[in-house]
Amino acid sequence: MRRSLVRNALAAAVLAACSFGAAAQDLLIRDATVHTATARGTLQHADVLVRNGRIAAVGPHLAAADAQVVDAQGAPLTPALFGGITDIGLEEVSGEKSTVDASLALGDGGGESRMSVRPEFDVTLAYNPDSVLLPVARIEGIGWTVLGAEPTKGGSLIGGQGGVVRLDGSPDPIGPRVLFVDLGSDAADLSGSSRAAQWMLLDQLIDEVHGKIAPTSPMALLTPAGRATLAKYVGGGGRVLVHVNRAADIRQLLRWADARHVRVAITGGTEAWRVAPLIAAAHVPVFVDPLSDLPADFDQIGATLENAARLHAAGVEVSFAFGEMSSHNARKLRQMAGNAVANGLPWDDGLAGLTRVPAETLGVAGELGTISVGKRADLALWSGDPLDVSSVARQVWLDGRAIPMRSRQTELRDRYLHADDGMPRAYPAGAR
């Protein structure tokens, strides 16, 4: 079974590695329903002009004699969507350890080993732009994701750093790095089986950054590189994504972040709606799982499908992320946004949670997340409502280049759907 999985993944990598174009071509998309994800809102029968891979103009009756013209015939046009917090390019076959690079396991696993607390760990260094998961996601309108660093047994509360990658095949992340932290019962094994100890450990790490504990102290938890890295996230610096669900833990996180001057965003946030006014007052965005509606554990007793809607009503900026299996299901994130809309979140804010909000939260709003002049021309044209699971992406452009709308899954579909010509189904049509 293992050999079969690896063999299939290796074969699929050939397709994933194929380039989908050279230089960007000027492009004019005519007569689209343009969902800008900006204050301009939705523009009916509008055009989008792309030059040199960037959006040059948005509005009615645009002209460009030298551009390739696409007639949208009124179809919805959105920014290429956010794929959530994933391991795309860090994970190929979940059950094959040699293809999984999203976590670090050092030390004794008790959460207090000096070697196990390594905020300097950066998962983007292992990113593989030839992963078969890229085309699977991008033909579904997903143009970018943030790579997450996952705390694991033998690690610590701090999983490490990740960053935003575009699914265009380029090898390097864009924008600033993001630090990942786990709190609550999920991280109990990393903190001496007590959530109270989590705050003790985090406070000590901050004290080390401020020089209150000498690097040579036998109680020090950070390496010199770890101190330098963590210092970038203290005092209002880089963004820290904290996975936490229980309302009491979220309240404590907000207090801690305010006292320590740490810019946090919440992921998970199953009970975030219960402290929504506090989150809104702290200007903390939340990446929710809109499908979380059952008390999976004691941290999620208050789970509700209305979480996103209630947070939004309180003034919280809402985006979306899967609780698990995020890499192989990134294309389904828009369905999750649609579920949030079905349970009370305004449609425009559902789209913003897949575009503008994550781009602003992760520090890439200057490049991605809206259809506006100067941004990258990462766009998706849809057959219908992009938040409706029955709609599909008719065409996706990255930097104004039309990507091939095929993946390993479509190749397998076509291989096995050919007409019966007497040959075994595993053979391509016309084989002898």
Image (cartoon, rainbow, N blue to C red):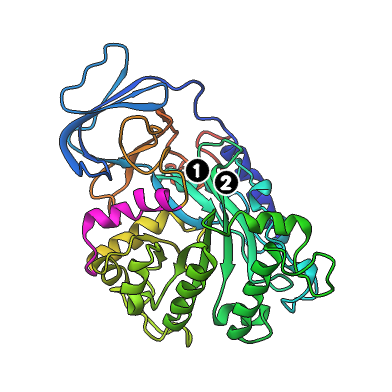
How crowded pointer 1 is (Cα within 10 Å; few <14, some 14-19, many 20+) is rated as: many
Q: Where 36 sits versus 283, above or below?
A: above
Q: Where 425 sits versus 104, above or below?
A: above
- From this viewpoint, is residue 143 visible? yes
Q: Where 247 sits versus 375, above or below?
A: below
Q: Residue at x 42, y 81 (%)?
A: 247
Q: Main secondary structure of the magenta part?
A: helix
> In the picture, which quadrant includes the C terminus?
top right
Disc number placed over residue 132 in the picture, else none = 2
Disc number placed over residue 411 in the picture, else none = none
Between residue 102 and residue 267, name the one nearer to us. Answer: 267
The answer to if 359 sits in the magenta stretch is: yes
Disc 1, disc 2: CB below 8 Å? Answer: yes
Amino acid tagged 1: Pro
Question: What is the C-alpha distance between the residues marked 1 and 2?
Answer: 6 Å
Q: Secondary structure at mark 2?
A: loop
Q: Which residues are magenta?
A: 343-361
* Residue that label 1 marks: 135
In the shown orientation, is residue 320 left or right of residue 233? left
Single out the residue that lies furthest toward the top.
Answer: 65
